[in-house]
Each structure stands twice: as C-alpha cells, then as structure tokens.
Amino acid sequence: MAVLRVVLDQANDIVDPDQADAARSLVLGLAETAPPRCEVEAIVPSGGEGIVPGARTVHRLALARRELGAAWQLGVVAGVGGGMIHAPSLFAPLVKHDRVNDYDQTVVTVWDLRAWTAPEELPRASVLWQRGMLKRAVKHADAVVVPTHAMAERLADLGRFADRIRVIPGAVADGFGIPLDATERRAALGAPARYLVATGGAGTLEPVFGAAVAVDADVFVLDAPAGAAAAIAETAASAGLPAPRVHIPARLDAPDRAALLAGALAFTAADVAATWPWRMIEALTLGVPVVAADGGVHRDVLAEGGVLVGAEGFAEAVRDAAGDGARRLSVMAADRSRAYSWNGSAERVWTLHAEL
C-alpha cells in the first residue's frame, strides 16, 4: 500500500484562507483520484479535531502551527517521519532524506512569489520565513510545484532547481458556487445595479476606475492590501470615480464573494503580480466576463477565456463586456474554467510522486 501524506498546516489555525481551502480541496481530490492500493493521510499541527475529510489517517504532531513553522525553518523534523510527503505550501519538513534507498520524498508548493518580486506588499516576518523555506527547498525538496508557467520561469531564477519545478494549477474551493440568497447578499453589501469587481492596489487600479466611469458603474475592490483604502480612494478620485462609488469590503466569505461576482458586469484584474489569481478563477467558474492586464500569469490562466489588455485598453474592453460582448465573454469564461479542477490537479500530483 502506497501512502501519500499531505501537510495541512492550517487545519486548526487559518492564516491564508485561500491556501487553506486549496489544501483541503486537494486532499479531497487526491482521495477521489487515488490509484489502486494508494491512500491519503494528513499531517497536521497539534490541536483541533482529529478528522480531515478525504484522509484515511491524521498524524497530529506535538507542536502547534507557529512553533512547528519555526522548527521546520531550522530543519528540526519534529516527529514527522518519512515516506511520500506533499505540502500544498512551503510549510514542510525540508530536511536531508534518501529518496533512492528509503523512498522518502518531499514536495512543496509555491502559490505566491511576492516575497521576492514585491516584498513591500507583505509583512516582513512572512517575507523572511518564505525566503528561508525556499532556501531549504532548494537543498531538500524533490520537486517544487507552482501553478503557472510564468511563475515557474520566475522561480527558476531564485535557486538551482534544475528539473525539479513542476506546474500544477489550482482551482476554486470545493463547494464554491452561487448561493440561493445571492440577491439578498448583494443588497447587504450595498451593491448597485451596475458594478465591476476588481483586484489590485492603488498603484494598479486607475485603469479600472477609468473604465468604471466609462460604463457608469461602481467598483468593488476585493483583497485590498491592509491600510490601502485611503490610497485606493484617492486613485479612484483622480480617475473621476467619486468615493461613494468605490467599495472596499473586508475579506468576504465564499458565499458573499460568489454572490458579488455573479452580479458583476465584469471581473477586472489590473495587477500582474507573480501570484495565483484566486478571484479570477472564481470569476471564470461563475461565467463572469474577465478583463485582465496583459502579463505572464494572466496569459497562462486566462488564455482564451477573457480579454487581455494594456492599461489603455481597459475602458474599451469593459465597455464591450458590459454591452454587446457580455454573453460571448461569459461563455468564454465558463469554457476556460473547465481547465481547472482539484481532481485534475490531484491526478497530476499522483503522477508527480509516481515519477519521483
């Protein structure tokens, strides 16, 4: 019996909800696509419940997440043991091991490269931890998974990985969909009849705000950096969009996000950061027209599923998405979303470990 052990570092303490949802969804996908005589087990920090959906067994370690992260950064294994270990993040026991004779292997995942490409956008402690763990991955990981080819190219410049970088995309969280009370949820969020949903920061959103003025729409900015509301409002004002028409909600849960996205004229992504675009994938899944700044990650993810534009093209593209092109772009988005599923990703994870 072959056992794949998955590290679920956020089983008890949620630090990054998107990555936590991805890890749980991957475990379910691995269980559903497991080859004959293969099973899935979970490795989790101390505390919390003893059941992980999709995992046959849960190995609960003696250390809590914070202490475990510090121990693994120093190379202290902390009772994990060997075997096939898959980490859906950089949170992994990266130590010297013998893959050839003992069949031990460790694979990690990198969803976000901003710790190297835009460290000012992240807390300093997070940047230092991620950089330290990637250095350990250079030495000890048997493979490093990233979700796009553009990120794979960036990652290759950060260390001597040779042929150990693999591309396996993510998907929407298991169960993500439009809630039955979507209309009520949009009303509670203050959504008008016409609005765009956007991601990005003050330095990238000006084309989106200009496009909103062109189509007479409000803008909801999701996942705005902490403390960025004032700067975003100032950017909107400079583009001619009054402050009351800019909405910057705190983090929304999945049903609220789905309800908001489903009612939008379009989803716009102006930031070309080297990170997996969780909201874009959600928009595609719901068949929302997508207009995105042309960049490596967006080209990989969107392909023919939406419109890639330069800064000067946002207004025209959004005007088309809100008008005659709405149905066409909705169909394109829904078609593209079929490229992303956790079962499909899980099958590629099984193949990766079999190859190792």
Image (cartoon, helix red, strand yellow):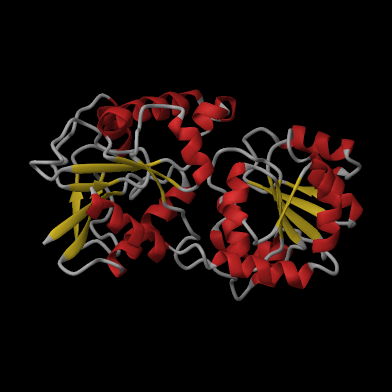
Which residue is drawn at the image coordinates 89% and 57% (left, top)?
Answer: 215
| Left or right of 235 in this view: 293 | left
> Does residue 112 appear anywhere in the picture?
no
Residue at left offset 13%, top offset 45%: 103
Tell whether 11 sits left or right of 176: left
Please determine whether, in this image, residue 183 is positioned above or below residue 6. Answer: below
Q: Position of residue 109 (x, y in %)?
A: 38, 43
Place of residue 190 in the rendered image (x, y in percent of width and height, measured from the top left): 76, 59
Asked whether residue 330 appears in the rendered view, the answer is: yes
Query: Quarter of the image holding residue 137?
Result: top left
Look at 50% across and 60% down and name the residue there. 172
Q: In the shown orientation, is residue 182 left or right of residue 51?
A: right
x, y percent for residue 250: 63, 47
- x then y, percent, for residue 44: 26, 47
Q: Is residue 281 above or below residue 247?
A: below
What residue is at 29 percent from the left and 43 percent from the top? 107
- Corner quadrant of residue 101: top left
- In this view, the residue farthest toward the bottom is 180
Quadrant of the drawing holding the N terminus: bottom left
The correct choice, above or below, for 112 with respect to 12 in the image is above
